[in-house]
Amino acid sequence: MTDQDPQNPPQEASTSETAPLTGAPFTAPTPPPPSPVYTAPLTPTGEAPVRWGGVVWGLLLTLFAAATLYVLASWERVRDVADWLASLTPGSAWALGAAVIGLVIVVSALLGGIRASQRRRVRARI
C-alpha cells in the first residue's frame, strides 16, 4: 500500500530537472572572500553618545503623562477640565491650538539645534 493520494497523482519530473549537465566541468562552489566590514571586531571606541533629542522628548511625554494621570485620578478634576473645555470660545480654542502647535515647533527647533551641535562635536573628534 502506498501513501499517495489518488485524487492528486504524483507529478512526473521533467528531464531538464533530472538530466546532468554534460558540457560544464564540475567545480565546487567557493565562498566569497570575507568582507573587511564583517571581519573587524566590533569594539566600542569610547563612551556612547547621549541622544539628547530622545531625552527631551522623553521628558515632555513623561510630563504629559503625569498631567493626564493627575487629571484622571479624580472625578472632580475630570469635571473641572470638561467644564473648562466646554467654556472655550471658538477664538480661544483656536488660540490654544496655535499655542500647542507653536510649542511643538519650538521643541523641534530646539532639538534640531541640539542635533546639529552633536554632529559638529563628532566631526571635530574625527
Image (tube, helix red, strand yellow):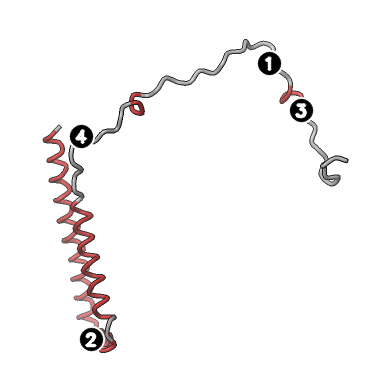
Give residue 45's mark. 4
Looking at marks 2 and 4 on the same chain, the residue that comes earlier in the sequence is marked by 4
**Residue 74, picture quadrant:** bottom left
Measure the alpha-carbon separation of dots 3 and 2.
78 Å
Q: Label 3 belongs to which residue?
A: 14
Measure the alpha-carbon separation of dots 1 and 4.
52 Å
Secondary structure of the residue carrying tag 3 is loop
Please say if 110 is above or below 15: below
Q: Label 1 belongs to which residue?
A: 21
**Residue 79, picture quadrant:** bottom left
**Residue 10, picture quadrant:** top right
| Camera-side mark, 2 or 4 | 4
Tell me which amino acid carries mark 3. Ser
Q: Where is residue 66 in the image (x, y as percent from the top left)?
A: 23, 72
Mark 1 vs 2: CB contact within 8 A: no
Q: Position of residue 96 (x, y in %)?
A: 20, 75
